[in-house]
Image: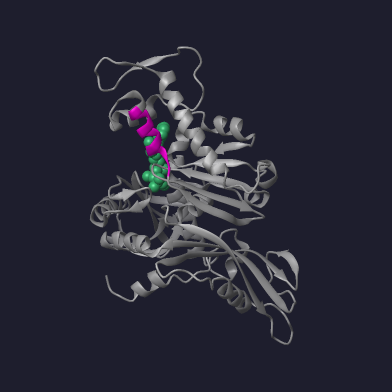
Amino acid sequence: MAKAKQNTFAAIDVGTSKICTVIANAGEGDALRVIGVGVAPSRGLQKGAIIDIDAAKEAIKESITESERVSGLRLESAYVGVSGKHIQSLNNRGVVAISRTDQKVASSDLERVLESARNVTMPSDRSLLHVIPKTFSLDGQVGIKEPVGMHGFRLDVETHIVTAATASVQNLIKSVRGAGVEIEDLILSSLSSSEAVLTPEEKEDGIIIADIGAGTTDVAIFRNGSVWHTTVIPVGGNQITRDISIGLGVPIEVAEQMKKKYGKATPVNGAGDSFQDEKGNGHSVATKDLCEIIRARLEELLRLVIIELPQSDYNAVVPAGLVLTGGTANLPGIDKLGQELFRLPVRIGVPSNMYGLTDNLYNPMYSTSIGLMMWGAMHESGEGLPPASMKNTVHDAVVRPLLHAKRLFKR
Ligand SMILES: Nc1ncnc2c1ncn2[C@@H]1O[C@H](COP(=O)(O)OP(=O)(O)OP(=O)(O)O)[C@@H](O)[C@H]1O
Ligand SMILES: [Mg+2]
């Protein structure tokens, strides 16, 4: 099989319910030309984190092999998403003096100030995943987005820092490498999804995104064009399925089928329709009962998302509203439910801006994979790397000792 060419890159979304590998090249304009996709049922994961390396490795391999078969290319490395409740975030400041005689900020000063921000005391069992500049200030003048070339004595940066449990990241690295693929970069899942479904204008205005998968809900808040807050809630579609299973007294697999086939987040009035229990035991299940269970759990989940906003005047913080993505965003009426609950504009985020083998990819459950590709495209073009990346809304200015140290070894 041919090796992947230079401008070809790949992403692997290791989700709780499915693994998705996408291979693409930078296509026309800023669109992606998708040339291979492989989706396999996930194994060895719980709530977004790997609990069984061997099982996960096999599932990842299956998805990679399928994407290779479709594209006719051999995959060497990929951008990989990270999630799980071990993820934590904090905000930190950095400061440096501009000591050159002309007092003009150079890109090396940006690197230095980020270096200073990244200097947080962390327990030894945690690793840095991202250090994202939010805003700069120069001699006390706040809100500067692009300080290079400006004059001043003192440069401050406010950053959003994402950390992960070292052991969890190591398990992910091990599983992907075990499947025969090197990791190009590790990216927080919520930031990947954001790349796929949010517009720069929305990020500028203020927006909250929730990627509701099977095991986790990955939340990110953007304000003034940059990441303002991120979190991972260890609840997702699996909990809805479990509630249905318990509430209606059916096995998990049956509950999952019912949810996908008949489930809605819209209220069902009156006695409503009913359908036959898929177990075939003659049971008739009222759609109303099913949908009430779904609505109750979703409402609880959406409240956990919105509570991440710093104040109850949601419109003031995120005027662009709430974007729902991830597989669970397929539940009809979930956007309406969000609107009713929070009086905010709510829309479903579906990846776009791609062509080629995209048949099934126009679904919110592929936001993370496509977002990882967009992140990849940004980096491959050189744009995503500091200091050039300072113009972008999401930038990654971190050296990941874990990943880089491991790269010294042969697979
Ligand atoms: N049509 C649908 N209606 C309702 N739920 C759906 C539908 N399609 C998928 N889901 C749910 O979406 C979830 C899977 O979403 P997704 O593929 O985004 O998760 P994942 O990435 O594997 O998991 P995670 O991100 O939590 O690690 C499952 O709980 C599934 O039941
Ligand atoms: Mg996911």
Classified by dominant secondary structure, the portion drawn in magenta counts as helix
The answer to whether 95 appears left or right of 398 in the picture is right
Which residue is at the far top?
Answer: 271
x, y percentage for residue 222?
Answer: 61, 52
Between 324 and 303, the residue placed more toward the observer is 303
- Identify whether 62 is placed above or below 245: below
The answer to whether 125 appears left or right of 61 in the picture is right
x, y percentage for residue 290?
Answer: 41, 23
The answer to whether 115 appears left or right of 287 in the picture is right
Which residue is at 39% across, 70% downward?
A: 402
Say which quarter of the image contains residue 327. Answer: top left
- Identify whether 120 is placed above or below 302: below
Between 363 and 97, the residue placed more toward the observer is 97
Queried whether the magenta region covers residue 7, the answer comes back as no
Residue 211 seen? yes
Magenta region? 235-246
| Quarter of the rendering occupied by the N terminus | bottom left
Queried whether the magenta region covers residue 237, the answer comes back as yes
x, y percentage for residue 172?
Answer: 34, 59
The answer to whether 119 appears left or right of 369 in the picture is right
